[in-house]
Amino acid sequence: MSIKLGKNTYGKNAVNLSKIIRHPDYHEFRQISVNVILEGDFETAHTIGDNSKLLPTDTQKNTVYALAKEHFVSSIEAFGLYLANYFASNNPQVSQVRIELTEHSWARMRFNGTVHPHAYCSGGNEKHTATVVQNKNGIEVTAGITGLLILKTTDSGFENYIKDQYTTLKETSDRIFATECEVSWVYNSSNILFVELFNGIRTTLLQTFADHQSLSVQHTLYAMGEAVLEKFAAVNEITLKMPNKHHILYNLEQFGMDNKNEVFIATDEPYGYITGTVVRE
Amino acid sequence: MSIKLGKNTYGKNAVNLSKIIRHPDYHEFRQISVNVILEGDFETAHTIGDNSKLLPTDTQKNTVYALAKEHFVSSIEAFGLYLANYFASNNPQVSQVRIELTEHSWARMRFNGTVHPHAYCSGGNEKHTATVVQNKNGIEVTAGITGLLILKTTDSGFENYIKDQYTTLKETSDRIFATECEVSWVYNSSNILFVELFNGIRTTLLQTFADHQSLSVQHTLYAMGEAVLEKFAAVNEITLKMPNKHHILYNLEQFGMDNKNEVFIATDEPYGYITGTVVRE
Amino acid sequence: MSIKLGKNTYGKNAVNLSKIIRHPDYHEFRQISVNVILEGDFETAHTIGDNSKLLPTDTQKNTVYALAKEHFVSSIEAFGLYLANYFASNNPQVSQVRIELTEHSWARMRFNGTVHPHAYCSGGNEKHTATVVQNKNGIEVTAGITGLLILKTTDSGFENYIKDQYTTLKETSDRIFATECEVSWVYNSSNILFVELFNGIRTTLLQTFADHQSLSVQHTLYAMGEAVLEKFAAVNEITLKMPNKHHILYNLEQFGMDNKNEVFIATDEPYGYITGTVVRE
Amino acid sequence: MSIKLGKNTYGKNAVNLSKIIRHPDYHEFRQISVNVILEGDFETAHTIGDNSKLLPTDTQKNTVYALAKEHFVSSIEAFGLYLANYFASNNPQVSQVRIELTEHSWARMRFNGTVHPHAYCSGGNEKHTATVVQNKNGIEVTAGITGLLILKTTDSGFENYIKDQYTTLKETSDRIFATECEVSWVYNSSNILFVELFNGIRTTLLQTFADHQSLSVQHTLYAMGEAVLEKFAAVNEITLKMPNKHHILYNLEQFGMDNKNEVFIATDEPYGYITGTVVRE
């Protein structure tokens, strides 16, 4: 039984790039991080150290900066499509290009109802992500959100679950529901309005979370995914990862006080972790 | 020459507490982290293991949760004042109580102009901080902000500095200025409108940053501090720490392209670090 | 075209557990973090909020602690096997149990050649990992290492790669090669000597890295994987992820000095990222 | 009452530098991070944007790399002394130079009792730190350790402390004592054997921790500091910061089992935080 190379990839990760796009009356500031991930005919690089088919990751990095000047002008999805096609077209030894992009959010400062033309505040940990995969089967665009930290103080319960010898959790019809959601969805086209779709999908996710009468994390996760598929024909499937950021009722009874869902211990670990994909049949 | 105990402190850190304050038409959600730091007559605890004057940090933690029910109802500064006084009053062996509080920011979700009554999005990494120190000299309240990540795309330069044999930096009259600002200011009273002052000072800091014609980080740092002291009589001194989050012009010339302040490399390290205190004379 | 639930999982993550195993002449201290990940018949939990088939993640956590007393007595692989079988046997609604374990490394302190019976130093960021997956197809045990930060100062080069219009990297026959390796390998049995195998595989990985005449990261990655498969019949396939922790030659020539591979800039981002699986044919 | 500049500093932080020092039979690999912090006559930089007395932080960074070639050849303390003196001597506008250095630990790999000449494993999170401060009063050298994660499974208790209405902690004569210690000590000379002293002090700290019959964290902290002052005449004072990395006994009684100090929950937050300085009188 001989030994051989299986699946392998390489590329430059965390290419951190910022850009000023100058509009007549304001500066648009954009900050992204790009990963380039290539698959292809790299067996001899591994087995005998033949580098003749390797485009160095340093060159990939330079390429991203150079192409950003002319081609990073609108959505990260569009820039990802351009990059994927550039690497695929110029590297016959490459069978698949995967471009992952993460956009940092910056919001123009606002004073007395007026938006400042060139001063920005960070939009926090929430990031817009996009992945473009190009291979012989075609092109697939995935968009998403990471770091979407959301919370509701009511309209959430957890009851009627399995009990066994190790059960100590108390049933509750009213609890805090907090999660740092990671969502991604696959588009069925690469010729769509990426910015408008992203904003619409994000709002749908938030509104469903806010209004849902939640019987469990699973229940709300599915409702959020279903709402997106119902409203957005361009989306074929959506995956949600929802760590449960537990806020645990503090035991005030031990000090002779009651705690009517008022004071909680916020914990990071351990955490429930719920994931699910909602698809069209 | 004998050996003895010098300055020493102890207490419980990172007491992570969340609270729902129920108003008639909405839920106010608050999340804070509290540090308790005590100084006092603890020499024999160190030298002979005599614990008779030690209030366990576990008890300190319980105390914070228990007192939050009735006394964490408005600003973190007010809750800090209550906690400091509680520990000082109940522990004669303690000569100084220091309470440090950090508030996580949560913003109610907004859909079509309407604010949701109980669903929240995280306000990101920017935190409101407060420190209350109570000892025999009295009480001092410090407030501040951490994680204030701000940026301007122009109105910033750096020229006419010292040149020597190791100088490679090019002078520029137009650069990106980005910083993750940490600010704290000392109030001259503990009987003031903490929430209103905080909001006013934060806006003054942002507006000064946005509008300043910056000749250096030092120049803008001082302007921001000065603006706060000029506008807010309740503030005696203010300290700003401004790491320079460099966005370095990418060298496109090497590929035959020009780069008119368009494409930048965003770097984390190394970073310039500028700190300064502005005071009343 | 209707909407339905696709792949979904849930469980408790980051169950942080430590244990003292008392031997006649010393205390064995163990610290692990456990993830429980269940798949199964959970569709109605998602679609209608029916929790009757959900074993709460809180109960999963309690179960891990309770079972650790009797059953976490040797390797994490063995404890993982016990946990996987426990959850599978007691939950008919579950079709697959996945247990992920990470062990923190602690080394007994050593003074003048003598090992202390109960005092420990942390072994750092390097962790031993294990994953057990149990479903109707059987049981699969994967072991691995994360955080394996290794470096060699020579016997590494990178030359004869593709050059194009964006190439600026200089060829070198002598460079620093540093990586924070993540490795995992699949065993072909669950009835093997997990501790001895782990130690042997780790040594083989290190020794191959140290002695290899590296022509690229890919070249060394493959050699490391191949060496493990050649020596350990119990391993069917091995996957290595090797981020390139770049140490870039600092340009001293600009100050009239030479730099014969002496002074380097250590950078975190961007980084080359090389991954590969080596398998038996 | 006018407004003016108070204390202020600036400099380049996180200058990440690695170096290969070539010995006849092996390569010595060193990796450090350097902060340069200057104080001086910088008022007009703040008040009117006059940069004529500012040595750019970019130039400071270049200087560190350039001077490392000839002058980073032994301890970080010695390199810090050289850097401090260089900046002080060449910049009359500077009244104080502070150089902070952190050394990453790398250990040469060892196979079958033989040390490899040029392959290294990371020494983990524990770092050797040093600070050199040079001003008109002279030069002060401080050394220390961060990230010293240590633990003992017995010989530690906590009893006879204050009880009040919020006490829930149970007294124990046998608990796990774990801490991620941060220690720093001030030398009374800059002309001493820095490497030998560092190693001796580190061993004394570990051995005292291991052998102490601990009645509280305070009790052990003091013992560790006292042992260093007793043994090392070159040390004038020592400061220890000891967060209590709690390992909390898991309640197995609720499931009808006993827990004789066997199974624990390892928690990060909240944590007791004990600090103290031990000095010569």
Image: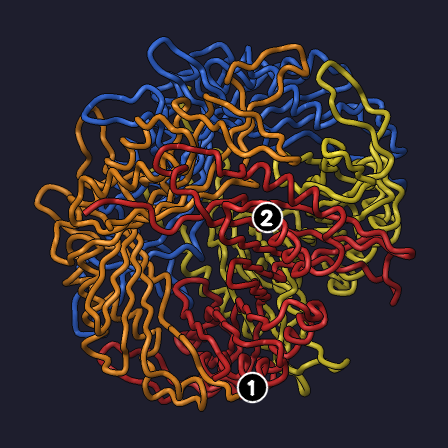
Chain colours: A orange, B blue, C red, D yellow
**Residue B156 on image: x %, y %:** 26, 46
SS category of the residue bearing label 1 = loop
Which amino acid type is marked by label 2?
Phe
Dot 1 or dot 2: first in sequence order is 2
For residue C87, which numbered disc appears in the image?
Answer: 2
**Label ID, residue B29:** none
Image height check: is B42 above or below D200? Answer: above
- Residue depicted at x 49% and y 16%: B188
> Which residue is the extreme one toward the left?
A24
Say whether residue D123 is left or right of residue D39.
right
Q: Residue at x 74, y 37 (%)?
A: D249
Locate residue A202, reporting x and y percent: 25, 40
Residue D197: % across, % down:
78, 60
Residue lying at 62% horizontally and 24% vertically, measured from the top left: B98
CA gap, disc 1 to disc 2? 44 Å
Query: Which amino acid type corresponds to the residue marked 1 in the rendered image?
Result: His
Q: Chain of mark 1?
A: C
Pointer 1 residue: C212
Give the secondary structure at mark 2.
helix
**In the depicted structure, whether residue C248 falls above or below residue A54:** above
List x then y, in percent, for residue A57: 35, 74
